[in-house]
Image (cartoon, helix red, strand yellow):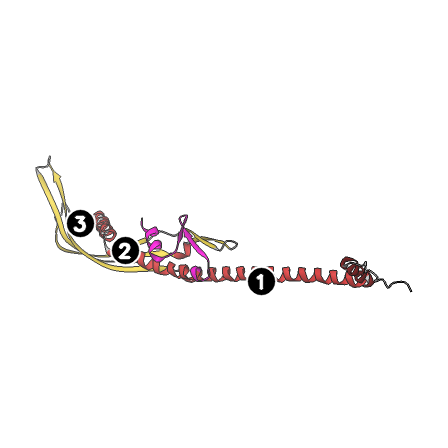
Amino acid sequence: MPPFKMKKNTSTTPSIISSLLQSIPKTIISYALFFGFLFFLGYQFFNSKSESSTIEYDTNIIQKQILNVGKLVVTEGHFSEVITYKDKKKYLMDMISFEKKAIVVINAEATVSFDLSKMKYDIDAKNKILTITYIPKEELKISPDIKFYDVEQSTLNEFTGDDYNKINKIVRANLTKKLQNSSLITNSKNRLVSELSKILILTNSMGWKLQYNGNEISTTNELLLKLKP
């Protein structure tokens, strides 16, 4: 009787997998690849749509907030002063003169305003950057109430409309100078920063950046410094 011999297994793993794949109908493989491709396209579509919707939503919120602060920011103050107005006319080679004078009391209401509806900005939704490109300058408005006391004049040098125009011009120049050196300007800048801070807080909370004059603004103090002349 011949000796028993073990039969070697000559098949390998790749050949087994190949055999299995050959046993699967090609139509099933085609369907699997086709639906896998559709799933990939669907994932990409809905993922990009969601990102686009988020950017659009953020942009709309920022634009709405800018619209909310786009109003007239007004700071009011009261100023008073007293001036003595004199004018002299001379005749006969200055040998004879006629003088007129009056004490002028001025009470004025002054306002400093910022029309934020004129503010300009740019939104970079891709990089999430809001850039303020223009903030309107303050507008000064003075409403003086002028009263005359101790008026002295003569028939050869009476008060006329020209005198009142001169006095009004002098009063406005003096009040404007006082206004520029008063705390009213500083208070108005603080009011302006208070309004713009609403935009700063919103952009920070949404992960956006706020820029002005080419610089990133992170705090209200930085914003106040950038608004200084």
Q: How many marks?
A: 3
Image check: 27 left or right of 91? Answer: right
Residue 80's image quarter? Answer: bottom left
Callout 3: SS: loop
Circles 1 and 3: CB atoms closer than 8 Å:
no
- In the picture, the disc for residue 50 is 1
Cα distance, mark 1 to mark 2?
Answer: 45 Å
Q: Work out whether residue 70 can be spotted.
A: no
Please name whichever residue, 24 or 148, is drawn nearer the observer in this view of the structure: 24
Mark 1 or mark 3: whose residue is earlier in sequence: 1
Image check: 223 left or right of 88? Answer: right
Q: In this view, does 9 lie above or below 101?
A: below
Residue 118: image location, x then y, percent: 41, 54
Mark 1 or mark 2: whose residue is earlier in sequence: 1
Name the kind of residue labelled 1 in the image: Ser
Residue 16: image location, x then y, percent: 79, 61
Callout 2: SS: helix
Question: Which quadrant does the N terminus fall into?
Answer: bottom right
Residue 43: image location, x then y, percent: 64, 62
Residue 52 falls within the magenta-colored stretch = no
- In the picture, the disc for residue 159 is 3
The residue labelled by disc 2 is: 186
Image check: 44 left or right of 218? Answer: right
Query: Of circles 2 and 3, which is in front?
Result: 2
Query: Of circles 1 and 2, which is in front?
Result: 1
Name the kind of residue labelled 3 in the image: Phe
- Farthest residue in the top direction? 93
